[in-house]
Image (cartoon, rainbow, N blue to C red):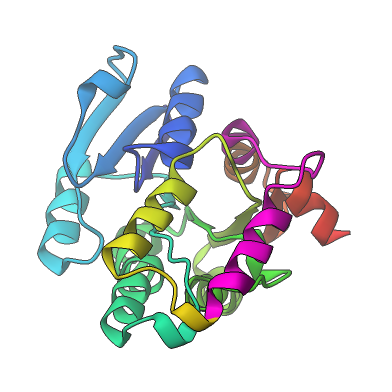
Amino acid sequence: MNTVLITGCSSGFGLDIAKHFLGHGWKVIATMRSPRPDLFPTSENLVLLPLDVTKDDSVARAIEAAGPIDVLVNNAGIGWLNALEGTPIDVVRSVFETNTFGTMRMVQAVLPQFRARRAGLIINVTSSVTMKPLPLLSVYTASKAAVNAFTKSLAMELTPFGIAVKIVLPGAAPDTSFGTTALSRLEDHGGFPDAYADFAETVFTAMRAPGAPKTRSLDVAEAVWYAATNPAAPVRIPAGADALALAD
């Protein structure tokens, strides 16, 4: 039985990715800051572990508790929506700490076992905004674009050890809480600067326009499954109708 460890499984993409792999008979190690068994179907193949990707000791404990794994899915991430001018540097650091450094921290933690076996797969979930940047998402986009560049370089670095590395790039997914959480964090930090308020409303109106292609959470789960089960999968895999449109 293959084993996958997935970060950020409390909601959205991570939760659906975990359920998708469970449905295909894999052993799933679903991680989140505070494990919630109520979110998942009962399964002897499911292991829930606490994990904060921003903490070295938390990562070390989770990897030790998980034991040997075949696939690591770095899905944990936080959103940030605001003009750069209205974004405190400590917020920039927190976004990078989770989205970028958290991914690197997880990769470093699993590499010894992968390298020893000369096998393993790392899948990093980033975002379609790295293909077509949008306004008011500059900090978030930068954190995910850094992971893209890191992944492409890492794929070459790890080839001699039989370790594969992939990127899944989801589009905008209205069926997850990601955008709502980002807006909540924005309000916690005082909202948009006054000078950007009108511009922000114009951007939001365009984003809400009916008929635009969107990504389903299931699209992302299927893209991660494809990356995990198809050795011929490319390094870069868009997920969702809008992401696929950008990739053409």
Residue 184: give x, y in percent of width and height: 35, 54
Horizontal side, residue 16 vs residue 199: left or right: left
Please report the residue visible at 60 percent of the width from the left and 76 percent of the height from the top. 156
Q: Can residue 151 be seen in this view?
A: no
Residue 139: give x, y in percent of width and height: 48, 77
Horizontal side, residue 246 vs residue 12: left or right: right
Q: Can residue 197 be seen in this view?
A: yes
* Residue at the extreme right: 248
Q: Nearer the viewer, residue 208 or 108?
A: 208
Please report the residue visible at 34 percent of the width from the left and 48 percent of the height from the top. 7
The N terminus is located in which quarter? Answer: top left
The magenta span reads 196-222
Is residue 66 shown above or below 193?
above
* Residue at the extreme top: 42
Q: Which of 48 and 25 is in front in this view?
A: 48
Q: Nearer the viewer, residue 226 or 186?
A: 186
Horizontal side, residue 248 vs residue 236: left or right: right
Please report the residue visible at 20 percent of the width from the left and 56 percent of the height from the top. 52
The C terminus is located in which quarter? Answer: bottom right
Is residue 201 shown above or below 19?
below
Residue 232: give x, y in percent of width and height: 74, 50
Magenta stretch encompasses residue 138:
no
Please report the residue visible at 22 percent of the width from the left and 23 percent of the height from the top. 37
Q: Nearer the viewer, residue 120 or 31?
A: 31
Task: Give the image quarter of residue 214.
Answer: top right
Residue 209: give x, y in percent of width and height: 75, 47
Magenta stretch encompasses residue 206:
yes
Is residue 178 shown above or below 27?
below
Label count reads: 0
Magenta: main secondary structure equals helix
